[in-house]
Image: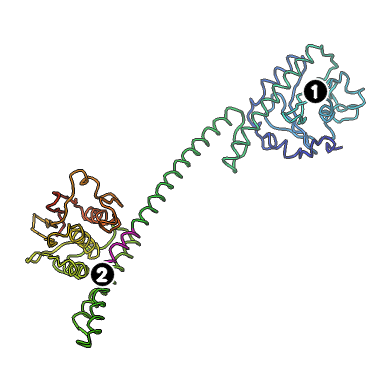
Amino acid sequence: MTLNTLKVDQTDRNELVKSYGFVEQLSSNENFLQEYLELATRICETEMAYISLLDDEKQYILSQHKSALQTIDVQDSICQFTIKNDCILVIENAGNHELTKCLPQVNKENGIKFYAGCPLVNKNNIKIGAVCVMDKQEKVLSRNQIDTLGVLGRQIMTTLDNQRNLIKLIKRINTNFKPAACADLSCLQGELAHLQDEVIAQNRLITNQKASLENANKDLVNFANMVAHDVRAPLRTISGFIRLHEQELLKNSKPYREEYLNFVKEATSNLDNLTVGLLEYAKSGIDSIKREKLNLSEILASVKLNLTEDILNLKAEIIIPEDRFFINGERVQLIQLFQNLIGNGLKYQNGIKTPRVTIQAREVGNRLRISVIDNGIGISADNLKTIFEPFRRLHSSQEYSGSGIGLTTCKKIVNSLGAELEVASEVGIGSVFSFNLPT
């Protein structure tokens, strides 16, 4: 005999019973539900009590004072009849009862004479098993004993449902969890609390990773803007000299001006070096770029070449130190640094006076104190605190072009060399950007 006829809404009884933890030896705790079984025997004044869950083929039995979970074939089980009833099944003489007289546990020597079983009905109104009492002597239960056994059965079912819900919740968090790892509600609650702590920690890690990703994306945008900003100057120089050469050709004055072509070649070489350097920076990061001893005059000469178009158009004056100074740094970074500072000095002018940018240098210990001085429009005291913020613009694009990334790049480069970028300015007079670079 099987229990296929007991399926409700096509319930898979095997999976249902397993979900309560019995099959996986959750009852390995010797105290698991024992207080209920002890109470059942006292209420009914019987020799033994047990809790059973039944699937389609097996009955799983948790007996009083026996920690090991026992199983028997469902066809040999008295409880198979209990869960077909809507009320408590009481059999006062099992040997003479038509349902039980043929069962092995009744017919054996000192077999069961008395049995009473209360169906365990879960919250979905499915009978999953029974709480039972039995004795080797015939007995009669009072109405009060029967009713109290029913109350006890409902309490046991509530405990089992709570246990099942905890198991399901824990498995949602940890799919590898085995109910046998915990033997009672307290253990399950502790496991759930532990997993909840882990979930909180994982959420915190994900939040941090998300923030790191957002910062990385922001750095990528900043890098793209920096590249666009810094390569435009040499491109303008190349374009300017090609235009001058075209004008000479149109005038038929000379087949070509070798001077212009040399400028184009040098500017192209500078652009190539800048591009390679920026790609290295993108791959490895600013902190891992190789440094070397560089001639300050050569760095400034490259910057002047990159800015030739602006210098010629503005008839600007760039004054560089006559003495030879050396800096310990990375060529592309230093070209970026001076190109941005000198370029800003040329750009932020009122158009009245001739633009002039002076680069001063003096040795201070093992550092080179450098100042980039311009005679531009200057910066107000209120704005000095914000000029290094990314994309911070003090003027509209109609007044002065730019992306607002130049000074941010300068500060980052100076900081990577272990220095601070300082600024002093007076509106209408000009600005001084100073920093100490390693030699």
* In the image, residue 61 above or below residue 88: below
Q: Quadrant of residue 183?
A: top right
Q: Which residues are magenta?
A: 223-235
* In the image, residue 275 above or below residue 93: below
**Residue 234 is one of the magenta-drawn residues:** yes
Residue named by callout 1: 117
Left or right relative to 39: residue 89: right
Q: Nearer the viewer, residue 344 or 112?
A: 344
Considering the numbered disc 2 on the image, is that residue within a helix, a strand or a loop? helix
Q: Quadrant of the N terminus?
A: top right
Q: Name the residue located 11 percent from the left edge and 56 percent from the top edge.
A: 369
Counting from the top left corner in percent of width and height, residue 96 is at: 92, 22
Left or right relative to 306: residue 126: right
Q: Earlier in the sequence, mark 1 or mark 2?
A: 1
Q: Name the residue located 68 percent from the left edge and 28 percent from the top edge.
A: 160
Q: Nearer the viewer, residue 174 or 323?
A: 323
Q: Quadrant of the C terminus?
A: bottom left
Amino acid type shown at disc 2: Pro
Q: Quadrant of residue 364?
A: bottom left
Counting from the top left corner in percent of width and height, residue 404 is at: 28, 54
Question: Can I make out residue 287 in this image?
Answer: no
Checking the image for residue 234, the label placed there is 2
* In the image, residue 435 above or below residue 199: below
Amino acid type shown at disc 1: Gly
Magenta-drawn stretch, dominant element (helix, strand or loop):
helix
Mark 1 Cα-neighbour bin, 10 Å: few <14, some 14–19, many ≥20: many
